Image (cartoon, grey):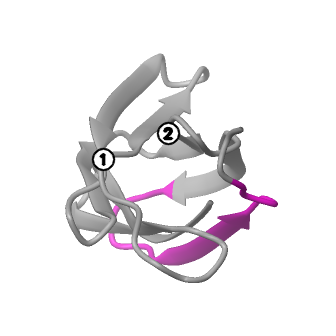
Amino acid sequence: MSTAGTAAGPRAGAGSIAGTVKDASGGAVPGATVTVASPDEGVEQAGQSNAQGAFVFPLLPPGTYTVSVELSGFKKTAKSNVISAGRRRASTSATSSSRWAT
C-alpha cells in the first residue's frame, strides 16, 4: 500500500494533510484506516480513505506528523516527517511492499 499526499494551510496557523491510498498496482484502496499523529503537538486523528482512496485531515496545528495506513490484508505503511503548516505546501509519499494477507 502507498500513500501520497500534501500538507497545506487553509488559514494562518492551521494546516491540513490530504492524500490517496493506493495498492502496489496503483489502484485506489477504499476503507483503509489512516492515522496522523504528532507527539510534539499532542495530536492524533484517525479516519478512513473514501471510495477513491482519498483522505483529508483539515485544521491541524502546525507541526511534524507521521501518517500511517492500515487495512486487513495489507502491510501497515507509515511516512514520517510530514509537515502541516499554515499556507505551506509539501508533498509526501510512502510505499511498502504491499501484499494480500494469506
Asked if the stretch drawn in magenta spans residue 97, the answer is yes
Q: How many residues crowd mark 2 within 10 Å: few (<14), some (14–19), many (20+)?
A: some
- Helix, strand or loop status at disc 2: loop
Q: Quadrant of the C terminus?
A: top right
Taking the spot 36% from the left edge, 39% from the top edge, the residue there is 61
Residue 8 in picture, x, y percent from top left = 35, 69
Callouts 1 and 2 close, C-beta under 8 Å: yes
Q: Which residue is mark 2?
A: 71
Q: Amino acid at mark 2?
A: Leu
Q: CA distance from mark 1 to mark 2?
A: 7 Å
13 in relation to 92, above or below: above
Q: Nearer the viewer, residue 101 or 42?
A: 101
Q: Nearer the viewer, residue 23 or 39?
A: 23
Asked if the stretch drawn in magenta spans residue 47, the answer is no
Q: Amino acid at mark 1?
A: Gly
62 in relation to 17, above or below: above
Q: Which disc is residue 16 wearing?
A: none
**Upstream in sequence: badge 1 or badge 2:** 1
Q: How many residues crowd mark 1 within 10 Å: few (<14), some (14–19), many (20+)?
A: some
18 in relation to 90, above or below: above
Q: Which residue is mark 1?
A: 31
As drawn, which residue projects farthest toward the bottom? 26
- Helix, strand or loop status at disc 1: loop
> Residue 98 is drawn in which quadrant?
bottom right
Residues in magenta, as a range: 84-99
Taking the spot 69% from the left edge, 64% from the top edge, the residue there is 94
Q: Quadrant of the N terminus?
A: bottom right
Residue 37 in picture, x, y percent from top left = 52, 30
